[in-house]
Image (cartoon, rainbow, N blue to C red):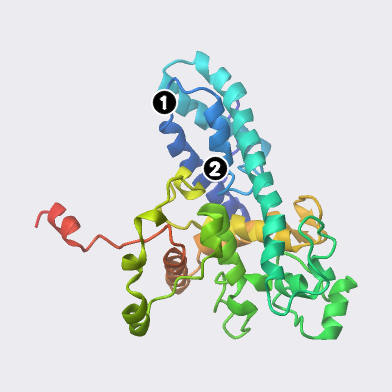
Amino acid sequence: MQNPPQMSPDNGSPSEVASLKRRLAVLEAQNAELRKQPVTERNEPHHTEGRNVSKISLQSMIDVSPWGWNQILMILAQITLKTIGGTDHIRNWRLGVHPFLNKGADGARADDTTRLKVTVASWLMQLTPSPSPVIQGQNKMGRGFNNDSTGRLICPVDYDWNDLVVRQHIRDYHPDYRVTAYSWPAFLYKDEQYDPQNPTNGLFKGHLLLKTFKYIFTSPTSAEMEDQEEPSPDNISTQGHPKQRRTAGERRTRCDVAGLLNMKSVQPRAIAYVAVQLRFALSSTGSWRVVDDEFNNQEFYDNIVDFLELPMTPDASKEVDNLLLWWNRHVSAYRPQRVQHLSVARCSGGC
């Protein structure tokens, strides 16, 4: 087989290098999962694996170039060769497993899209005052920029949705008010508030974004719960500590999506996936498409991943670390702990 062309930082543009890094990260995660598969496992479980993988990668590696996709298949085939121990299995693996992964990934995205279409409408109709016109659960024609409530949420933060002239320009597709993936939509920000002087303040802390993440990755019930904030002394004295309030009846008996993915903490690609799903649910587009008018969902996903995985400066990297820590504290399934300086780690180091 002819070797694929090699690309290095010297002969590739920054965007190409960043794209390759994203693809490599996806490959490493999926390769690790494949190593865990038992030899005698049938094809059907790969259908489930495909559903889980799609939660992390918007297109489950479909956006790679033709030579890149072939290389991916060869890499995974090499893993299969090491696991099973025979070259005769490589072709069967490529023909048998790959369709199941794609089928599972497509099915998972479709399930999330269908459920969120109804659920997000229900959430918005609980607002006070209620949206006008009414947001229907099954019909999306009354969403997007056709509705002031959803329009405010998906409006680019570079434009002032409260300005009626600007609002009309957006609806009329005015060339000076284009809606593209080069502007963050307002729902990504805490309270939909954007500060041009401090553009990262509140970014990826939107209430609806966090709620949608819980709905997809933990459980619909957790999405309905109030955001967990640090308890105040008064609340602890009257309500008890959160650990004391938890009862045996609250223990989960089913494994959520995060558990199936073995996701121990909130991942940047999971946030990006949720953001894309939420924006689509808020839009007036009836069926999924990568490009919605002028808004490219793949670019939107890539921009979020690049921001969270490829910070440009040490300060930006620290800011991202703090952001992910905030996410882990607000998603009840995750309780990260920095253990490197605790007693077990210190003793393991030869104390």
Describe residue 273's horizontal placement relative to residue 314 as left or right.
Answer: right
Mark 2: amino acid: Asn
Rendered location of residue 295, percent (x, y): 76, 61
Rendered location of residue 339, percent (x, y): 26, 60
Mark 1: amino acid: Pro
Residue that sits furthest to the right in the current view: 172
Rendered location of residue 2, percent (x, y): 60, 27
Q: Which element carries disc 1, helix, strand or loop?
A: loop
Q: Label 1, label 2: how many angstroms apart (C-alpha)?
A: 18 Å
Rendered location of residue 18, percent (x, y): 57, 55
Q: Quadrant of the C terminus?
A: bottom left
Residue 216 against residue 189 in the figure, above or below: above
Which residue is nearer to you in this view: 273 or 177? 273
Q: Residue at x 52, y 45 (%)?
A: 26
Q: How many numbered discs, if any?
A: 2
Among numbered discs 1 and 2, the one appearing first in the sequence: 1
Q: Residue at x 33, y 78 (%)?
A: 236
Q: Residue at x 57, y 37 (%)?
A: 50
Name the mark on residue 52: 2
Q: Residue at x 61, y 43 (%)?
A: 60
* Residue 293 in view in this figure: yes
Residue that sits furthest to the left in the current view: 351
Residue 4 occupies quadrant: top right
Q: Which element carries disc 2, helix, strand or loop?
A: helix
Residue 116 occupies quadrant: bottom right
* Residue 175 in view in this figure: no
Name the mark on residue 38: 1
